[in-house]
Image (cartoon, helix red, strand yellow):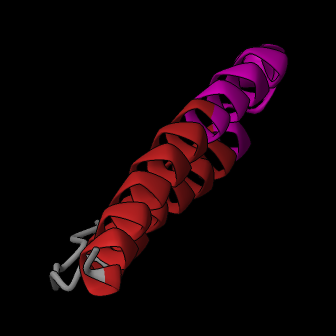
Amino acid sequence: MDWSSVRVKFRAVFRVVFCVFNVCYAIGSYLLWTNVLRPLRWVRAEMYHAIEGTMYRWMQENVAYWLWTAGYTGVVMTT
């Protein structure tokens, strides 16, 4: 048995499990917080959009991290 191929397969499976778990956690917490902060949207819309924009950028950074650990480089364009 070639241990280098076992190591590569283990890393691939670990990476997929980690990414799926991280997606579920990140999207779930994003949706929870946007729903909790929804009343702020009617009171102080600019503050709500600033907080929501920050949380969205954090989710984009998660994706950029996965790409970087896979050896890809990407540019996140924000306005």
Between 23 and 11, the one lying in front of the other is 11
User: What residue is at 72 percent from the left and 45 percent from the top?
Assistant: 47
The correct choice, above or below, for 60 with respect to 17 in the image is: below
Which quadrant holds the N terminus?
bottom left
Residue 14 pos. (x, y %): 49, 57
Q: Is residue 31 left or right of residue 43?
A: left
The correct choice, above or below, for 63 with respect to 65 in the image is: above
- Per the image, is 38 magenta? yes
> In the displayed image of the protein, which residue is found farthest to the front?
1
User: What residue is at 31 percent from the left and 63 percent from the top?
Assistant: 9
User: What residue is at 59 percent from the left and 39 percent from the top?
Assistant: 21
The correct choice, above or below, for 60 with respect to 47 in the image is: below
Residue 76 pos. (x, y %): 25, 72
Secondary structure mainly formed by the magenta segment = helix
Residue 17 pos. (x, y %): 50, 45
Between 52 and 11, the one lying in front of the other is 11
Between 10 and 47, the one lying in front of the other is 10
The correct choice, above or below, for 6 with respect to 20 in the image is: below
Residues in magenta, as a range: 25-48
